[in-house]
Image (tube, rainbow, N blue to C red):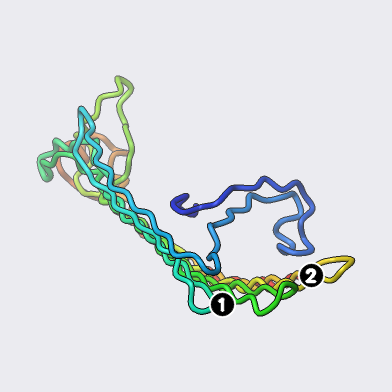
Amino acid sequence: DPNPWDMGRVEILKGPQGTLFGAASLAGLIRYVPNYPELGKWSGTAFYDYTSVEIGGTASSYAAAINAPMGDTVAMRVSGILQHLPGLLDSNNPSRHEQDTTTGRSWSGRAMMLWQPSDQLTVNAWYTRDRRTTDDLNLVTFADGTYTRDDAPAPSPAENGYSLATLDVRYAFDWATLVSLTGYQQKDSHNRMESSNLILPLAQAGISYLRSDRKVDAHGLLQGV
């Protein structure tokens, strides 16, 4: 999901929405609307966050956004966020003694440009990229709910992300507004799963015998008027 940093609003649109957003939106969709660039206005914001988990690790987050006008008809907005994710689970296995194994990192960046040569014509172009990596799977395998695993002889790291380029062109007539939306999206996911806990005696002895690797890449183009 898109990181909500520097997001203007989130819209819940009932279906069908296929005219502008494609055949995959017949049942409706969730639309994330970012803060668009503003003409003639310099502005910026930033934040720092520190997280400490009582039974886990610590992590920091950083984010910033800036709006920069470039003449009377053009403006740019750039924003980004970097989050470190605190670990929670520990591993107590003959082949692996580690604390806070489920640490991770998430980052997102967005660049947007607005061109408004007249009151009728507005052109917004933007590009965003989002990545999330985790060192291990957030999985508790014991009925007592403890946060220490003895059945994971190896980690299960994962990396997921997407990139999105969008061109939004709008022309306002006296009687209606013509809208053209063009988008190209690329998504990728790479997960390496340690499943040796299916046979506990082997896993608890530190023997890694069952692993799976899944890698998925998907691309999509959208054009709506």
Seen at 63% across and 49% down, the residue is 30
Seen at 49% across and 65% down, the residue is 41
What's under tag 2, amino acid-wise? Ala
Q: In the picture provided, is 217 more to the left or to the right than 82? A: right
Above or below for 199 versus 115: above
Query: In the rendered image, which quarter is residue 49 located in?
Result: top left
- Of the residues under marks 1 and 2, which one precedes in the sequence? 1
Task: Say if mark 1 contacts mark 2, CB within 8 Å.
Answer: no
Near-viewer residue (125 or 209): 125
Viewport quadrant of the C terminus? bottom right
Seen at 17% across and 38% down, the residue is 91
Near-viewer residue (89 or 155): 89
Query: In the rendered image, which quarter is residue 224 located in?
Result: bottom right
Q: Residues within 10 Å of mark 1 (few under 14, many from 20)?
A: few
Q: Where is mark 1, residue-wise? A: 72
Q: In the picture provided, is 185 more to the left or to the right than 173? A: left
Above or below for 97 versus 72: above
Q: Where is mark 2, residue-wise? A: 172
Secondary-structure class at tag 2: strand
What's under tag 1, amino acid-wise? Asp
Spatial separation of the CA atoms under disc 1 and disc 2? 19 Å
Near-viewer residue (73 or 203): 73
Above or below for 95 versus 6: above
Task: Measuring from the top left, give residue 113's x and y in whole percent.
Answer: 53, 73
Q: Residue furthest top?
A: 144
